[in-house]
Image (tube, grey):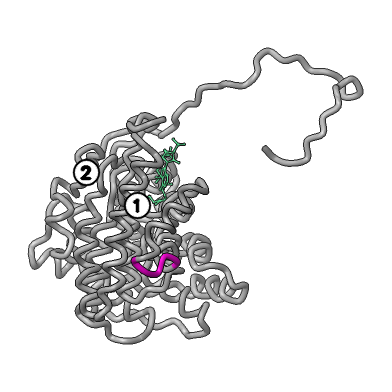
Amino acid sequence: MSTQNDFAPIVGQTQLSSVDGQAGRLAIRGYPIEELAGRVTYEEAAYLLWYGELPDTMALTDFAGQLASRRSLHPASLELLKACAAERVAPIDAIGMAVGTLGLGVAQDDAPMTLVARFPTLVAACWRLLNGHAPLEPRLDLGHAANYLFLLDGRLPSAGRVKAVETYLVTLIDHGISASTFAARVIVSTQSDVVAALAGAVGALKGPLHGGAPGPTLQMLLEIGSLDRVESYLRDRLARGKRLMGFGHRDYKVRDPRCDVLAAAAQAVYQAEQNVATYALARRVEEVAVRLLAAYKPGRRLYANVEFYASLLMHGAGLPAELFTPTFAVARAAGWVAHCLEQQRANRMLQPQTVYTGPQGRRWIPLEQRPAVRRTQLP
Ligand code: ACO
């Protein structure tokens, strides 16, 4: 049994974000996440990550304008997304394939900013094509979050929806050396490029133990459906040895600090929609899950993680579950890029070692003398 993060060796240094898993704290460039989420725009948070300071008005106007002017996709990205839509490829897989095209027609120096600017356009175009609609042209007059929502359905989003999605994007922008960020840093550390690094990061993100969790988390909440089913549903799941989605974290052995800001944003969204029952259900699920996890998995210290309230918030903001993980990628894009740039600035190839535990000193035997082996499946 492991209650400490004892399988996570330190692989380097970062000045971007700090994670204290025992105290439950996340800070971006020294700012606790609660200071930023709900207060700054995604552009401000990205600027902070990349340059180390929050921008003043002039710097922000310039930075936001530079991002906005790079939003349009290369035609080849759209062609690839069309082919994926024709094959009914799931959005996160189509996006994984198309990330490699995001740097097309762009000078290497310009790739970091262009990748972040184009990410929402890519996700929205993928979604529209999959649903039989033509992709829309980005709006230069809208911020990153509002433009993303506009690109999805062609409607000018309400201030409440923009605030909800912006809070989500800022909260998820960076988180130390998560699995996907590590993948990105390993790739650039070989002197490969940022486009390849982001393609690798998306590949790592999509698994259900990392960024693929919010869809199944929402599904669990919807399956529970009502307050009277919470305890029996969760007990049954744990008794069958299944994991409770949205709970447990490799770093946090207390409640994930991002839960508070996302829960507050979710509460505002559900109140505005006059659907407080769903929010109340989620709060009850958290309460009961934590109690049952302590009973079924004593000593493991399992609490709600970011995905629990992220899925609730995105659902409330009207995002379809298939876009939860792609939207996570939209948020994390600026963080991945910041880590790539930091790695490149003081690079040493990241190449960890493994401890070999297999057999030793074996000798070759001619084919006709070997003992019978009947293995047909990969281990
Ligand atoms: N429900 C039930 N049991 C759990 C859960 C859970 N959500 N999470 C961990 N456990 C149990 C494991 O079964 C294991 O029990 P055991 O010791 O009896 O075998 C023990 O706790 C330790 O589990 P590990 O998988 O070793 O813990 P790890 O730190 O590697 O796991 C992880 C972290 C993968 C997030 C895990 O908690 C999990 O699978 N959670 C559900 C999926 C999820 O919500 N993922 C999103 C994470 S947030 C993010 O990545 C952005």
Magenta segment boundaries in residue numbering = 223-227
Residue 358 coordinates in the image, percent (x, y): 62, 21
Residue type at mark 2 is Gly
Residue type at mark 1 is Ala
Q: Mark 1, residues whose alpha carbon is within 10 Å: few (<14), some, or many (≥20)? A: many
- The residue depicted at 18 percent of the width and 60 percent of the height is 37
Instruction: Check disc 2 and report the residue beneath it.
Output: 24
Q: Which quadrant: the N terminus?
A: top left
Mark-to-mark CA distance, 1 and 2: 18 Å
Residue 187 visible in the snapshot:
yes
Q: Quadrant of residue 259?
A: bottom left
Query: Please, what secondary structure does the residue beneath circle 1 have?
Result: helix
Instruction: Check disc 1 and report the residue beneath it.
Output: 289
Dominant secondary structure (helix, strand or loop) of the stretch shown in magenta:
helix
| Quarter of the displayed picture in which ligand 1 can be seen | top left
Residue 108 coordinates in the image, percent (x, y): 38, 56
- Specify the label residue 192 is tagged with: none
Direction from residue 59 to residue 323 in the image, left or right: right
Direction from residue 373 to residue 216 in the image, left or right: left
